[in-house]
Image (cartoon, helix red, strand yellow):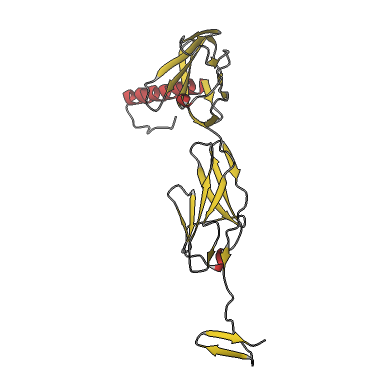
Amino acid sequence: CMGQDASMEPLGTTFYDLQCKIYVLLLGVSSALKLTVPSHTIHGIEGQPLQLSVGYHFNVTVSDIQIIWMFEGPSTRIISLLMSVNQTVVSDLEYQHKFTFTPPNASLLIKSLHFSDEGIYTVKINIAGNGRISARENIHVTVDVPVTKPVVYAEPAAGVVEYKGNITLKCTVRNGTRVIYQWMKNGNPIEASANYSLSANHDILSIVPVVKEAVGNYSCLATNPVSAMQSDVIMPKIYYGPYGLTVNSEKGQKIGKVFTFDK
């Protein structure tokens, strides 16, 4: 510990030394057990297994190692899934076939994910020896369905004339949860602008007004935490021009704004 003023009273010195010893003792206890998880958020796929990997090590002599797994869902209270002491596992009968757990390995395998499995998983390890120390970590698990390949539709399919109409592109996926849509033109992301407007969840792109510069190859990228798929390219029909057209004919006759020509 840091030094102190030599003028301090003996009682103060004794109290200061005691504080230092307590601090060193607590530091030693907290570092005696180290619990680690690769990530505090893991994205799983509905119907697939998911491994919650846990590592731990300690530098003290132990007689018993207790591992506890708990779960809290978005609308459920904290429940105890299973517990082990050394290599003996005691599990809730409701969940005993849902998990694979082989202590002293603290990792937990969820055999088949369902949407009800989404939530916070807490692993706690207690070690008993000359004293008792513990550590815990939380893992947030999300469950999603992968997105299928998006399909893009253009309305109107027959196309529009520049400055005379609007084009709407719609992106749809048959399956997928928590889908995020990103529109691309010629391979580059599209952001909202004077000519482009997006729906609230970006699955609809409106080109208003239609201009020549909007001509190009459009596609839709659909993603979620467990997948990403891109649609085929679509090229909306935009009719434009000709610009600055002039007529030069000695055999023509102008009637108002209409020209007629003699063959």
What is the quadrant of residue 240 in the picture?
bottom right
- Residue 118, placed above or below residue 86: below
How far across and down, in percent of the image, does residue 93 sit? 46, 9
Quarter of the image with the N terminus is top left
At x 60%, y 47%, the residue is 231
Task: Locate residue 54, reporting x and y percent.
Answer: 55, 23
Q: Is residue 170 left or right of residue 19?
A: right
Q: Is residue 231 above or below residue 120?
A: below
The one nearer the camera, 32 or 118, is 118
From this viewpoint, is residue 91 visible?
yes
Name the residue: 56% across, 35% down. Answer: 146
Q: Is residue 147 above or below residue 47?
A: below
Residue, far right:
263
Viewer-side residue, 34 vs 221: 221
Residue at screen point 53% across, 49% down: 182
| Residue 152 place in picture, x, y as percent | 56, 49
Question: Residue 53, can we see it?
Answer: no
Q: Quadrant of the C terminus?
A: bottom right
At which x and y percent is residue 60?
Answer: 54, 15
